Amino acid sequence: MGVRTVSGDSGIGDPLALENQVCFALTIAARNVVALYRPVLAPLGLTHPQYLVMLALWQSAPLSVKELAGLLELDSATLSPLLKRLEAAGLVRRERDPEDERRLVVTLTPAGRELREQAREVPERMMRLLDMDADELRRLNAVLGRLSTAAADADLSADGS
């Protein structure tokens, strides 16, 4: 789906043209990419946010809820319902750390570990659906990472406003 202008003007040189806005391009791209994940993840029984939680756990389990929230850049109010649903599905377990009762640790169940094998096909399917190769996606990921870091580190007082 391309972005069209109302006036037919390409918007070149107009800093307020919709198609020149990074925020708009990111919003549309994110919406479209996440929509592509839905049918790919459906056979795994996962939503896109649940898939992200599982990716973090497949990489580094066990993790405390605080560590997991930090990795995913989610607050606990958003993460807790995801973990409850994954636990209800039998994929993860949440338990108090015996050495520190304040710490809630998330571990994978055997079913959660087995699901990783089924999920191995997801990246390849997404590359085909997006018609992009691994190198292209790595470069895009690097640019998006730099953009995210720059936005997080931006000093709003430095722009003179």
Image (cartoon, grey):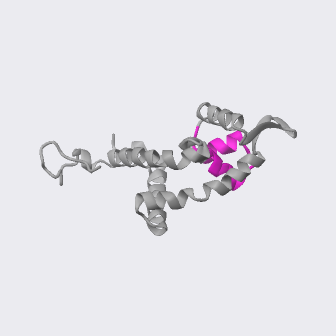
Image position of 49 (left or right of 127) = right
Image position of 122 (left or right of 31) = right
Residue at the far front: name it.
43
Q: Is residue 143 visible?
A: no
Residue 17, position as x, y percentages in the image: 21, 46
Query: Which residue is drawn at the image coordinates 52% and 50% (left, top)?
Result: 40
54 above or below 82? below
18 above or below 59? above
Q: Nearer the viewer, residue 9 or 147?
A: 9
Q: Nearer the viewer, residue 84 or 69?
A: 84
Residue 53, position as x, y percentages in the image: 63, 45
Q: Main secondary structure of the magenta part?
A: helix
Q: Nearer the viewer, residue 68 or 1?
A: 1
Q: Which residues are magenta?
A: 53-74
Residue 98, position as x, y percentages in the image: 87, 39
Query: Which residue is drawn at the image coordinates 68% and 33% (left, top)?
Result: 84
Residue 77, position as x, y percentages in the image: 61, 30
81 above or below 61? above
- Which picture quadrant has residue 64? top right
Residue 44 in magenta stretch: no
